[in-house]
Amino acid sequence: MYETFCPLSDKYVENPKRRILIDRVYITLQIPFLWSILGNHFRKDIYEDLNHRFPQFVKRMVEKSGTKKTATFHFQVPTEMRSGKPVEEDLDGKEVASIAISMKSPHIARGYFNMNRVYLLKKGIDPYEDSFRDDNVLPIWVEEDDKGTLLKEYCRLFCERIEEFKFEYIHYLKNAFGLDVLELARKLGKMEDLYSLVDVSVQSAEIDIEWLNCESLQFQFITDERKTNHLKVYGDLTQTEYYTTPSARNPIQWKRYQKGAGINRHEFTWNGDISRKWLVGDPEHLYHSIIHGVHQSYKHFGYNFENLKPLQLKGESVVQTCAEWWHVSLDLAKTILFGKAYSLTFDFHTKGLRERLMANNLIEPLEKELGGKRGVYRWNDTVQGMRLFYQGVYRCECGSLMRYDSHQYRHICEKCGKIDDYSRFSIGNEQFEVIGFKSLGDAKNG
């Protein structure tokens, strides 16, 4: 496998900000001594009892035994959700963790948890107010330091969540399946601690390397280098690129996509033995193991994690990317990101533009409490977030960051003096708060 190094030049961001996070994790839980007591067969009595008491939690799922796959019933219940109500009462909240226990003895369980959601929940961060209205990504202002504090906190919460799964597994075995694990263990002369009787094995996990203040175009060189290999590009808004086929047969999968304005996510999925080898130990050991695994994952695809850097981009290149995402002209993309318009109206000649913006989910009706009425729109929350972000990271041709003047609607490079003026993109009559789109030709001429 060849290795690609990014040359140290002014073409690349010298000190990129990045953070390593644990994302979605899938585990199995079992109690080994139950094999000798219960055997291996479908428990019809348990199925009928649970289907009567908790029909909403009875699911038919596929189990794998060796090379053979069979479908059987499971007791699947969310164990942690973003909701103030007990999970038994509210199944509409966002699932943080869940467990599915097989109704086939010895009742092996599968657990799922989303570490980004765990972190947000534990830290009291509301993704619908503090982030991109997405509960699977941290706000861009949550940064890693040179001591690895953020990843170490993830590792601590990861280990705590595994212990919680042991408790939940034993709890449901006793209260739903009628199996008192401790009593059965004592009858067999086993004197271990209750939770040490549970074996936990990681089946797969997603590890995110998030490059902050960074756009997908800044890793275009990866796209160019990998396009003759495993690259698969899907036409969604995140422009996801798969560098391996999404199959559990691949021990390391890699995909790259734009998770939000300024967050380019490199997501590695570790499967099977790889996940069990790198997601082990106490929080301190786990931290170093994940760092090692990230280095090995990039190396597997021919890259050196320490030397990998995103390309520097001119501001216009980034805006051009937005224009392509939104299927609009470059001038209109600049108007959306840097222009004066907040509240929007459209006339007969621009109704097609309104329909295009709505089809791309860029605008929505202005709320009544903000002065909204029929025919008045605003940029949606995602666009508003991107407006704030791009106003602060527009890069000049000389390589310096440009300062955004929110009063004169322009970017200024304080190094070379270059000015990008957007005041010409003022649309409509400025004496009103509501800005109206005229014809597209008028919009371009300002």
Image (tube, rainbow, N blue to C red):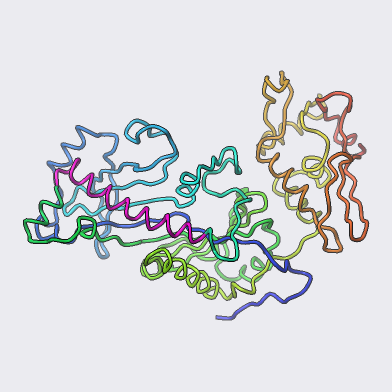
Q: Is residue 167 magenta?
A: yes
**Does residue 419 appear in the picture of this structure?**
yes
Which stretch appears magenta? Answer: 151-179
Q: Position of residue 26 (x, y in %)?
A: 37, 56
Which residue is drawn at the image coordinates 28% and 38% (left, top)?
57
Which residue is drawn at the image coordinates 61% and 69% (left, top)?
226
Q: Is residue 62 left or right of residue 82?
A: left
Locate residue 3: give its quadrant: bottom right
Above or below, 430 against 444 in this view is above
Locate residue 84: give its quadrant: top left
Which residue is drawn at the image coordinates 68% and 26% (left, top)?
365
Which residue is drawn at the image coordinates 63% and 50% (left, top)?
141
Q: Is residue 138 left or right of residue 197?
A: right
Q: Position of residue 220 (x, y in %)?
A: 69, 64
Q: Is residue 286 magenta?
A: no
Q: Is residue 239 left or right of residue 113?
A: right
Locate residue 174: give its quadrant: top left
**Does residue 241 appear in the picture of this structure?**
no
Q: Quadrant of the N terminus?
A: bottom right
Above or below, 404 against 246 in this view is above
Front residue of this view, candidates 196 and 394: 196
Q: Is residue 156 left or right of residue 381?
A: left
